Protein backbone atom coordinates (compact mmCIF):
# COMPACT_ATOMS: atom_id res chain seq x y z
CA UNK A 1 0.00 0.00 0.00
CA UNK A 2 1.38 3.39 -0.94
CA UNK A 3 1.81 5.60 2.14
CA UNK A 4 -0.14 8.89 2.09
CA UNK A 5 1.86 11.91 0.99
CA UNK A 6 1.93 15.08 3.08
CA UNK A 7 1.17 18.52 1.63
CA UNK A 8 4.82 19.49 2.00
CA UNK A 9 5.90 16.30 0.29
CA UNK A 10 3.44 16.89 -2.51
CA UNK A 11 4.79 20.37 -3.16
CA UNK A 12 8.38 19.10 -3.08
CA UNK A 13 7.68 16.24 -5.48
CA UNK A 14 5.77 18.55 -7.80
CA UNK A 15 8.72 20.92 -8.03
CA UNK A 16 11.09 18.05 -8.79
CA UNK A 17 8.76 16.79 -11.51
CA UNK A 18 8.47 20.24 -13.03
CA UNK A 19 12.23 20.53 -13.18
CA UNK A 20 12.31 17.50 -15.44
CA UNK A 21 9.94 18.98 -18.02
CA UNK A 22 11.74 20.52 -21.03
CA UNK A 23 11.50 24.29 -21.09
CA UNK A 24 9.99 24.21 -24.57
CA UNK A 25 7.01 22.26 -23.25
CA UNK A 26 6.31 24.24 -20.13
CA UNK A 27 3.50 26.78 -20.34
CA UNK A 28 2.71 25.91 -23.95
CA UNK A 29 -1.00 26.54 -23.57
CA UNK A 30 -0.71 29.32 -20.99
CA UNK A 31 2.42 31.34 -21.74
CA UNK A 32 3.71 33.68 -19.08
CA UNK A 33 2.52 37.27 -19.48
CA UNK A 34 5.00 39.70 -21.00
CA UNK A 35 7.26 41.60 -18.65
CA UNK A 36 6.00 45.03 -17.63
CA UNK A 37 7.04 47.78 -19.97
CA UNK A 38 10.10 49.78 -19.02
CA UNK A 39 9.08 53.17 -17.63
CA UNK A 40 9.48 56.09 -20.00
CA UNK A 41 8.38 56.86 -23.52
CA UNK A 42 8.65 53.94 -25.96
CA UNK A 43 11.33 54.19 -28.62
CA UNK A 44 10.09 55.33 -32.05
CA UNK A 45 9.70 52.54 -34.62
CA UNK A 46 9.75 52.49 -38.43
CA UNK A 47 6.80 54.47 -39.82
CA UNK A 48 3.64 52.72 -40.87
CA UNK A 49 2.42 53.19 -44.44
CA UNK A 50 -0.15 55.95 -44.67
CA UNK A 51 -2.99 56.94 -46.97
CA UNK A 52 -5.03 60.06 -47.52
CA UNK A 53 -8.68 60.79 -46.82
CA UNK A 54 -9.90 64.16 -48.00
CA UNK A 55 -6.38 65.55 -48.15
CA UNK A 56 -5.39 64.39 -44.66
CA UNK A 57 -2.89 61.63 -43.97
CA UNK A 58 -3.74 58.63 -41.79
CA UNK A 59 -1.92 55.43 -40.90
CA UNK A 60 -3.34 52.45 -42.76
CA UNK A 61 -3.54 50.61 -39.43
CA UNK A 62 -5.88 52.49 -37.07
CA UNK A 63 -6.56 51.92 -33.38
CA UNK A 64 -10.09 50.84 -32.49
CA UNK A 65 -11.66 52.29 -29.38
CA UNK A 66 -13.93 49.48 -28.15
CA UNK A 67 -11.44 47.87 -25.78
CA UNK A 68 -10.37 51.22 -24.40
CA UNK A 69 -13.98 52.22 -23.86
CA UNK A 70 -14.83 48.91 -22.20
CA UNK A 71 -16.99 47.57 -25.02
CA UNK A 72 -16.35 43.93 -25.83
CA UNK A 73 -18.06 41.64 -28.30
CA UNK A 74 -17.63 38.41 -26.36
CA UNK A 75 -20.50 36.21 -27.51
CA UNK A 76 -21.66 34.35 -24.36
CA UNK A 77 -18.59 35.13 -22.22
CA UNK A 78 -20.25 37.66 -19.96
CA UNK A 79 -17.13 38.54 -17.96
CA UNK A 80 -14.97 39.76 -20.86
CA UNK A 81 -16.17 43.38 -20.92
CA UNK A 82 -15.51 43.73 -17.19
CA UNK A 83 -12.09 42.13 -17.60
CA UNK A 84 -11.18 44.60 -20.35
CA UNK A 85 -12.28 47.52 -18.19
CA UNK A 86 -10.27 46.26 -15.22
CA UNK A 87 -7.17 45.74 -17.36
CA UNK A 88 -7.33 49.09 -19.13
CA UNK A 89 -6.62 51.37 -16.20
CA UNK A 90 -5.89 55.05 -16.75
CA UNK A 91 -2.16 54.30 -16.76
CA UNK A 92 -2.57 51.40 -19.18
CA UNK A 93 -4.64 53.48 -21.61
CA UNK A 94 -2.01 56.21 -21.48
CA UNK A 95 0.65 53.61 -22.26
CA UNK A 96 -1.46 52.22 -25.11
CA UNK A 97 -1.69 55.62 -26.82
CA UNK A 98 2.05 56.20 -26.45
CA UNK A 99 2.90 52.75 -27.80
CA UNK A 100 0.52 53.17 -30.72
CA UNK A 101 2.12 56.46 -31.76
CA UNK A 102 5.62 55.08 -31.28
CA UNK A 103 4.78 52.25 -33.67
CA UNK A 104 3.38 54.60 -36.31
CA UNK A 105 -0.36 54.44 -35.61
CA UNK A 106 -1.65 57.96 -36.08
CA UNK A 107 -5.41 57.47 -35.76
CA UNK A 108 -7.98 56.26 -33.25
CA UNK A 109 -11.72 55.75 -33.73
CA UNK A 110 -14.09 56.02 -30.75
CA UNK A 111 -17.69 56.91 -30.01
CA UNK A 112 -18.03 60.55 -29.02
CA UNK A 113 -20.16 59.70 -25.97
CA UNK A 114 -17.73 57.26 -24.37
CA UNK A 115 -15.02 58.35 -21.94
CA UNK A 116 -12.50 60.10 -24.20
CA UNK A 117 -10.64 62.13 -21.58
CA UNK A 118 -7.61 59.85 -21.97
CA UNK A 119 -7.28 60.94 -25.58
CA UNK A 120 -7.62 64.60 -24.68
CA UNK A 121 -4.98 64.18 -21.95
CA UNK A 122 -2.73 62.50 -24.52
CA UNK A 123 -3.04 65.59 -26.71
CA UNK A 124 -2.15 67.83 -23.76
CA UNK A 125 1.02 65.79 -23.25
CA UNK A 126 2.03 66.41 -26.86
CA UNK A 127 0.41 63.40 -28.52
CA UNK A 128 -0.63 63.78 -32.16
CA UNK A 129 -3.15 60.95 -32.48
CA UNK A 130 -5.93 61.96 -34.88
CA UNK A 131 -9.48 61.18 -33.85
CA UNK A 132 -12.24 59.86 -36.07
CA UNK A 133 -15.43 60.09 -34.01
CA UNK A 134 -18.47 57.83 -34.20
CA UNK A 135 -21.80 59.59 -33.67
CA UNK A 136 -25.45 58.69 -33.42
CA UNK A 137 -28.52 60.87 -33.77
CA UNK A 138 -30.25 62.23 -30.69
CA UNK A 139 -33.48 60.64 -29.50
CA UNK A 140 -35.39 63.32 -31.42
CA UNK A 141 -33.23 62.97 -34.52
CA UNK A 142 -30.94 65.90 -33.70
CA UNK A 143 -27.25 66.28 -34.36
CA UNK A 144 -25.76 67.27 -30.99
CA UNK A 145 -23.25 64.39 -31.07
CA UNK A 146 -21.83 65.70 -34.34
CA UNK A 147 -21.44 69.16 -32.82
CA UNK A 148 -19.77 67.71 -29.75
CA UNK A 149 -17.30 65.65 -31.78
CA UNK A 150 -16.28 68.68 -33.82
CA UNK A 151 -15.99 70.92 -30.76
CA UNK A 152 -13.80 68.32 -29.04
CA UNK A 153 -11.34 68.10 -31.91
CA UNK A 154 -12.33 65.23 -34.19
CA UNK A 155 -10.59 65.23 -37.56
CA UNK A 156 -13.37 63.12 -39.06
CA UNK A 157 -16.89 62.13 -38.06
CA UNK A 158 -19.11 59.28 -39.20
CA UNK A 159 -22.52 58.03 -38.19
CA UNK A 160 -22.43 54.55 -36.71
CA UNK A 161 -23.50 51.49 -38.65
CA UNK A 162 -26.52 50.85 -36.48
CA UNK A 163 -27.68 54.43 -37.00
CA UNK A 164 -27.40 54.27 -40.79
CA UNK A 165 -29.11 50.89 -40.85
CA UNK A 166 -31.99 52.12 -38.69
CA UNK A 167 -32.50 55.13 -40.95
CA UNK A 168 -32.53 52.90 -44.00
CA UNK A 169 -35.09 50.56 -42.43
CA UNK A 170 -37.28 53.50 -41.38
CA UNK A 171 -37.30 55.10 -44.83
CA UNK A 172 -35.39 58.14 -43.53
CA UNK A 173 -32.15 57.71 -45.40
CA UNK A 174 -32.13 61.38 -46.36
CA UNK A 175 -30.89 62.03 -42.81
CA UNK A 176 -27.64 60.27 -43.69
CA UNK A 177 -27.09 62.91 -46.36
CA UNK A 178 -27.94 65.64 -43.88
CA UNK A 179 -25.30 64.41 -41.43
CA UNK A 180 -22.69 64.47 -44.18
CA UNK A 181 -23.62 68.01 -45.17
CA UNK A 182 -23.40 69.21 -41.57
CA UNK A 183 -20.02 67.57 -40.96
CA UNK A 184 -18.54 68.93 -44.18
CA UNK A 185 -19.92 72.40 -43.47
CA UNK A 186 -17.79 72.32 -40.32
CA UNK A 187 -14.69 71.46 -42.42
CA UNK A 188 -14.36 67.93 -41.09
CA UNK A 189 -14.07 64.65 -42.95
CA UNK A 190 -17.49 63.04 -43.27
CA UNK A 191 -18.09 59.30 -43.37
CA UNK A 192 -20.69 56.58 -43.19
CA UNK A 193 -20.25 53.28 -41.36
CA UNK A 194 -22.20 50.10 -41.96
CA UNK A 195 -22.49 46.45 -41.10
CA UNK A 196 -25.17 46.02 -43.75
CA UNK A 197 -23.86 46.44 -47.30
CA UNK A 198 -27.19 47.95 -48.37
CA UNK A 199 -26.20 51.18 -46.60
CA UNK A 200 -23.14 51.63 -48.81
CA UNK A 201 -25.12 50.68 -51.91
CA UNK A 202 -27.76 53.30 -51.06
CA UNK A 203 -25.11 55.98 -50.46
CA UNK A 204 -23.56 55.29 -53.86
CA UNK A 205 -26.95 55.21 -55.57
CA UNK A 206 -27.86 58.59 -54.05
CA UNK A 207 -24.47 60.06 -54.97
CA UNK A 208 -23.85 61.27 -51.42
CA UNK A 209 -20.74 63.37 -50.84
CA UNK A 210 -18.89 60.84 -48.67
CA UNK A 211 -15.21 61.29 -47.78
CA UNK A 212 -14.84 57.70 -46.57
CA UNK A 213 -16.77 54.54 -45.88
CA UNK A 214 -16.28 52.35 -42.85
CA UNK A 215 -17.53 48.85 -43.65
CA UNK A 216 -17.17 45.55 -41.82
CA UNK A 217 -15.18 42.81 -43.51
CA UNK A 218 -14.17 39.42 -42.18
CA UNK A 219 -14.17 35.86 -43.45
CA UNK A 220 -16.37 33.14 -41.98
CA UNK A 221 -13.37 30.98 -41.18
CA UNK A 222 -13.90 30.81 -37.41
CA UNK A 223 -15.75 28.51 -35.07
CA UNK A 224 -18.71 30.73 -34.16
CA UNK A 225 -19.23 32.12 -37.67
CA UNK A 226 -22.79 32.25 -39.00
CA UNK A 227 -24.17 28.97 -40.25
CA UNK A 228 -25.78 28.50 -43.67
CA UNK A 229 -29.07 30.35 -43.76
CA UNK A 230 -28.05 32.96 -41.17
CA UNK A 231 -28.09 36.14 -43.22
CA UNK A 232 -28.63 38.87 -40.63
CA UNK A 233 -26.32 41.88 -41.00
CA UNK A 234 -25.42 41.37 -37.35
CA UNK A 235 -25.04 37.88 -35.95
CA UNK A 236 -27.93 36.82 -33.77
CA UNK A 237 -25.52 35.75 -31.02
CA UNK A 238 -22.98 38.61 -31.15
CA UNK A 239 -20.94 36.39 -33.43
CA UNK A 240 -20.90 37.99 -36.88
CA UNK A 241 -20.64 41.47 -38.39
CA UNK A 242 -20.24 40.72 -42.10
CA UNK A 243 -22.88 38.29 -43.28
CA UNK A 244 -21.73 38.05 -46.91
CA UNK A 245 -18.06 39.01 -47.25
CA UNK A 246 -17.86 38.14 -50.96
CA UNK A 247 -20.72 40.53 -51.74
CA UNK A 248 -18.84 43.25 -49.85
CA UNK A 249 -15.62 42.52 -51.74
CA UNK A 250 -17.40 42.57 -55.09
CA UNK A 251 -19.32 45.79 -54.49
CA UNK A 252 -16.47 47.71 -52.86
CA UNK A 253 -14.36 46.93 -55.92
CA UNK A 254 -16.67 49.38 -57.75
CA UNK A 255 -16.48 52.11 -55.09
CA UNK A 256 -13.94 54.90 -55.66
CA UNK A 257 -13.78 56.22 -52.11
CA UNK A 258 -11.40 55.37 -49.23
CA UNK A 259 -12.58 52.32 -47.30
CA UNK A 260 -11.78 51.70 -43.65
CA UNK A 261 -12.51 48.04 -42.93
CA UNK A 262 -13.55 47.23 -39.37
CA UNK A 263 -14.40 44.12 -37.38
CA UNK A 264 -11.77 42.38 -39.50
CA UNK A 265 -10.85 40.04 -36.63
CA UNK A 266 -14.51 39.10 -36.08
CA UNK A 267 -14.05 40.51 -32.57
CA UNK A 268 -10.95 38.49 -31.80
CA UNK A 269 -12.01 35.21 -33.40
CA UNK A 270 -9.62 35.50 -36.37
CA UNK A 271 -5.87 35.92 -35.92
CA UNK A 272 -4.36 39.10 -37.40
CA UNK A 273 -2.02 36.94 -39.52
CA UNK A 274 -5.12 35.81 -41.43
CA UNK A 275 -7.27 38.93 -41.07
CA UNK A 276 -4.81 41.61 -42.20
CA UNK A 277 -4.05 40.01 -45.60
CA UNK A 278 -7.72 39.17 -46.08
CA UNK A 279 -8.73 42.82 -45.59
CA UNK A 280 -5.96 44.48 -47.59
CA UNK A 281 -5.96 41.96 -50.43
CA UNK A 282 -9.72 42.32 -50.77
CA UNK A 283 -9.63 46.06 -51.17
CA UNK A 284 -9.56 47.79 -47.79
CA UNK A 285 -7.49 50.97 -47.81
CA UNK A 286 -7.28 51.16 -44.01
CA UNK A 287 -8.02 48.69 -41.22
CA UNK A 288 -9.45 49.56 -37.82
CA UNK A 289 -8.31 47.13 -35.13
CA UNK A 290 -8.99 47.03 -31.41
CA UNK A 291 -5.72 46.33 -29.59
CA UNK A 292 -4.45 45.89 -26.09
CA UNK A 293 -1.05 47.46 -25.43
CA UNK A 294 0.81 44.15 -25.75
CA UNK A 295 -0.60 43.53 -29.24
CA UNK A 296 0.47 46.81 -30.82
CA UNK A 297 4.08 46.05 -31.72
CA UNK A 298 3.31 42.72 -33.40
CA UNK A 299 0.31 44.14 -35.27
CA UNK A 300 2.30 47.12 -36.54
CA UNK A 301 5.08 44.84 -37.83
CA UNK A 302 2.51 42.61 -39.50
CA UNK A 303 0.71 45.56 -41.09
CA UNK A 304 3.95 46.82 -42.64
CA UNK A 305 4.65 43.43 -44.22
CA UNK A 306 1.11 42.90 -45.49
CA UNK A 307 0.76 46.40 -46.95
CA UNK A 308 4.12 46.07 -48.68
CA UNK A 309 2.99 42.80 -50.25
CA UNK A 310 -0.39 44.27 -51.24
CA UNK A 311 1.39 47.22 -52.87
CA UNK A 312 4.05 45.22 -54.69
CA UNK A 313 4.23 43.68 -58.16
CA UNK A 314 2.68 40.41 -56.93
CA UNK A 315 -0.24 42.19 -55.23
CA UNK A 316 -3.50 40.29 -54.89
CA UNK A 317 -5.64 43.37 -54.24
CA UNK A 318 -9.09 43.40 -55.80
CA UNK A 319 -9.25 47.21 -56.19
CA UNK A 320 -6.82 50.11 -56.54
CA UNK A 321 -5.69 51.98 -53.44
CA UNK A 322 -7.96 54.92 -52.71
CA UNK A 323 -6.32 57.38 -50.40
Image: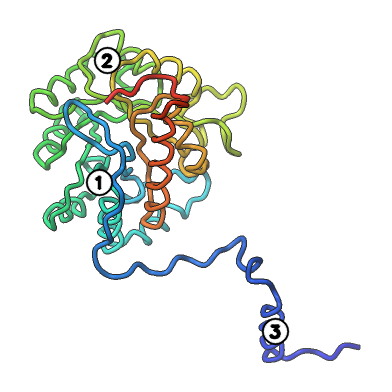
Query: Which circle, 3 or 1, is nearer the viewer?
Result: 3
**Percent of width and height locating residue 155:** 16, 36
In the picture provided, is 231 more to the left or to the right than 97?
Answer: right
Q: Which of 139 and 316 is in front in this view?
A: 316
User: Residue at the spot x=43%, y=37% of the render?
Assistant: 306
Taking the image as shown, residue 67 lies to the left or right of residue 9, namely: left
Sequence-first tag of 3 and 1: 3
Look at mark 2 in the image and give the residue it sits on: 173
N-term-proximal mark, 2 vs 1: 1
Count residues near mark 2 (Cα–Cα under 10 Å), then give few for <14, some for 14-19, many for 20+.
some
Element at badge 3?
Answer: helix
**Disc ID at residue 114:** 1
Q: Which residue is drawn at 17% across and 32% down?
A: 56
Foreground mark, 2 or 3, reads: 3
Q: Mark 3 points at which residue?
A: 16
Q: CA separation, marks 2 and 1?
A: 26 Å
Q: Residues within 10 Å of mark 1 (few under 14, many from 20)?
A: some
Callout 2: helix, strand or loop?
loop
Q: Residues within 10 Å of mark 3 (few under 14, many from 20)?
A: few
Give the alpha-carbon distance from disc 2 to disc 3, as whole Å. Answer: 69 Å
Amino acid sequence: MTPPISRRGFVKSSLIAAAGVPLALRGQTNPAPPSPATPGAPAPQPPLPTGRIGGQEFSRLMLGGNLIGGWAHSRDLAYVATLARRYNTDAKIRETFELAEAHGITTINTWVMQENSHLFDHWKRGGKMKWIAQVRLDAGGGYSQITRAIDEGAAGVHITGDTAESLLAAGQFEKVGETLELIKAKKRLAGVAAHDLRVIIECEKAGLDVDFYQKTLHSHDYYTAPRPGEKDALGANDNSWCSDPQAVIDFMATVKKPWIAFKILAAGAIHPRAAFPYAFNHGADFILVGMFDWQIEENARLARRVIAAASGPASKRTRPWYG
